Amino acid sequence: MGVVRVERLAKSFGKVVAVDGVSFEIAEREFFSLLGPSGCGKTTTLRCVAGLETADAGTIEIAGRPVYRADAGLDVPPNERDIGMVFQSYAVWPHMTVFDNIAYPLRIRKIPQAGIAGRVAHVLRILGMTGLEERRPSQLSGGQQQRVALGRALALAPSVLLLDEPLSNLDAKLREQMRAELKLIQRETGLPILYVTHDQTEALAMSDRIAVMCEGRIHHLAPPEEIYRRPATAFVLDFIGSVNYLPCRLAGADDSSVTLLWREEAAITLPRPPHLPPGPDVLLAARPESWRFAAGSAGLPGTVVLRSFHGAGFEYRVRLGETEIRVMTPNDVRVSEGEAVRIVVSEGLLLEPDALSRPEARAA
Amino acid sequence: MTAGQRALPARAALGVAPAWQRAVTDHRHILFAVLSVFVFITVVYPLLQVAGRSVIVDGALSLANYAQVFALRRNWIAVWNSVWVSLVATVLATAIGVVSAFLVQRTDIPAKTLFRVLLVAPFAIPPLFSAMGWVQLAGPVGLLSQAWQGITGEFEVPWNIYGASGVVFVLAVTKYPFVFITVASALQRMDPSLEEAARTAGVPTWRIMRDITLPLVRPAVSSGALLAFVASIDNFGIPAVLGMRAQFYVLTTRIYEALTIPNMPLATAMSMLLVALAIVSMIGLRRAEGGADKYAVIAGKAVTPAVLKLGSWRPAVVIGLALAVLLITVLPLFALVLTSITTFWGADLVWANLTLEHYVSALTIPAARRGILNSLFLAAAAGVILVLTTSLISYLTVKARYRAASWLDIAGIVPFALPGSVIGVAMILAWSNPPIGPTLYGTIWILLIAYIMRYMAFGLQTTRATLQQIHVSLEEAALTSGAGRLRVLKDITLPLLRPGMVAAWVLIFISAFNELTVSVLIWTTGAETIGVWIFIMQDSGFSGRASALAVLTLPVILVLYLLMQWLTRLEERRAGRSKG
């Protein structure tokens, strides 16, 4: 039984369909992310769960209690939903101190003064902000304001924590640090989290499960690794990580492997992917780290057009006929620009040739 | 509140409450109804009266009133004078405003804050006081005239403060702050990368200023100039003190004259001509602001723009600016103080000629004492009433998204574009013999309604801007923290709106306290204002007493003016921080 249950949720703004039949469940202690490009409906879904938007259809339950049911006309206002929410803009109240910001939800619930002081101190300790109680938000850095917003959402120990792109306003270094801290805070508090982001790295690093959304629908709902390795649709494949596409012909397949022909000459042998397109013409989709340079006469012939350093390794752009393939290699592999090379691929997925124009086309 | 609003359709579908019941219990409908009545009484009804009565003679439609205006030569000369005097004054004001804004914002002159405060100060000083001060400086026995005579040995001074030239000059030196403020703020908020792009291309600083900076702030210059033009057309105190004596009349003083006779139909028709002038100027203003949008060079953040190093010119420029500020802002006030403590105007500055008798005699006149108390009360009351009502109107339009409330917003802004004389005539027409309700003409309440009408725009614009700055997520955060709608209003929205309300109150108080154009048309015995009484004393030749009263009111105005400056600075700092 999930802490949050969303079923067949739908919401339109005028003629624009924002959310189109979304269903998911969030388990106890789970870090659940809604991931997608802007306009995919992820924030609208979150705001419906919070009660800040009223959906058109579907049901929402929080901690076993229905808070929205279109068929029964039930719509519990946000202040009675037992949630904690962190906004993209932090929304830390500028006219209150750090203490007052975090204590506010407790005061609303008429918790005795002593209890409030203890609870706020506890939250500030978790956030590493002890001593800043009397500061005003204008005296805090962006990261600190972010923590206050988080502390305010945590103060009441709500049934679920809703986070709307909370890290997108922070600089890269701080974002990485907050990612880890958020994970640790969740482990300490045990609160389930519904997390909305457009940043795939963030979602992959933090989530227990991810729902990848596109045009109001969930395309793939699975743990991060599965999303990355076995993306359900062409959209998910293209949106998550980087990927090379190479048009090929399917020459043969058995239980464990497939054989592809590139330009009717060079043969590629791969482990059999979960999904085989019906026709002989296919699009091979493979991550840059699945490609490597081959010694001798094996592999596909190409020319290195660009080499760029990525810290942990090099990325090469290899021209292969009319297409360009990105190849990620460790630091010890050195090839010069302009050099003729041969490349091989170790795993990949097969798509129908027109899949890229159909986001919902099956990938794995 | 938005959440509750959106929740309605679902409940309606279920028939939880019948529509009429929801309409009655929905606070927005009640609020809207009450505010609509308020705006109708204070704004719409008086305006309908002027427009209607100008074309109705003996119960029938007629243009006879307008014919009467143009039948007399002195009437259309007044119309023409209003136009050309305001135009020339605006050109001068624009020159002063642009140059001073540029010097303060973009050069390395010292004491910029002091210069800025002194340059904006004429904004807060009643134009009547400036006119009086200039008479005492440059009039026949004024300080500057005496100085000229002393230096050159000639009796004739090469200027005449009475008549057209004086009116133009004093209008220019009192209205330039409109240009200064708009241009200075545009210069401050201009995206520095536009100039940096030119600098990296090797363009020298002075050419960047000429080729990039000035063209980019041109929209700000035109909108400041138009505000100065409208304010010049509107003004009564300056042409009354400097023009009427020389038989030089503009529309506002001509309307005043027509009402003392009294010729109500003539005043009404001339008011409508002023409205026409105002509409033409406002269309111009809209155009200028539309142009500002097109450029879109204003970054929404505080930046540190390039500064032109004046080099060896610096001392000369600083001394010149200091002298100008001294002449424009300090000397007229100094002359007022001096006149108020010398036995007679033009008396030699010796100990025996110093006296406090003007203060004593001014304050022993009951009407003057009443005027002071009336003005304090009216300005404070108009401020309180307007801050409360316009906050509610802005709440309806901005936060409650109540579509119909936008008519309140539009109607409330209209009087801002109307010259004060029109409002005065409208008040007399509306409240002399109203079809329902008491006759307010002859009481101080007509002044209160007039001030409410005249300054409603100040309240609306300030409170709307403040509410728009309160990001909706601040209120949503309180909702998700467990607070109900009213609690959110009390704990979040109101506290954040409060600085805007205070700023609006101060602005309205200063404006109403300084008001003369409307007041001079609708005051009656028992319902005097301080400005009216100072004008009457000045007009009757008691410039010592008039100056004494003016000097007494100056501390009130200056303290409030400094308070307003401080509040604005505070607001800017807060806005600047919360953005980061």
Image (tube, rainbow, N blue to C red):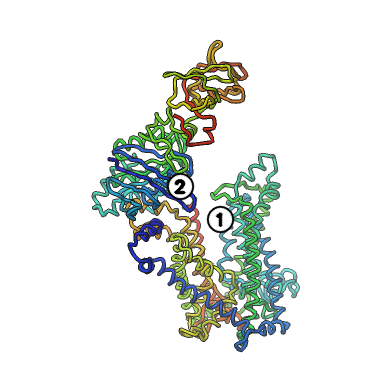
- Give above or below for B296 relative to A123: below
Q: Nearer the viewer, residue B451 or A253?
A: A253
In the rendered image, residue B523, in percent from the top left (x then y), is placed at 53, 82
Numbered tag placed on residue B65 in the rendering: none
| Res B558 visible | no
Residue at point 70%, 81% (across, down) = B75
Q: Is residue A138 left or right of residue B316?
A: left
Figure quadrant of the N terminus of chain B: bottom left
User: Within 10 Å of the Cα at label 1, are there few (<14), some (14-19), or many (20+) other Cα atoms?
Assistant: few
Numbered tag placed on residue B113 in the rendering: 1
In the rendered image, residue B81, in percent from the top left (x then y), is placed at 70, 75
| Res B446 visible | yes
Q: Are marks 1 and 2 on the same chain?
A: no
- The quarter holding residue B203 reads top right
Q: Secondary structure at mark 2?
A: strand
Q: Nearer the viewer, residue B285 or B566?
A: B285
Q: Which residue is mark 2?
A: A18
Alpha carbons under labels 1 and 2: distance apart: 51 Å
The three-letter code of the residue at mark 2 reads: Ala
In the rendered image, residue A248, in percent from the top left (x then y), is placed at 55, 23
The three-letter code of the residue at mark 1 reads: Thr
Number of numbered labels in the structure image:
2
Q: Nearer the viewer, mark 1 or mark 2?
A: 2
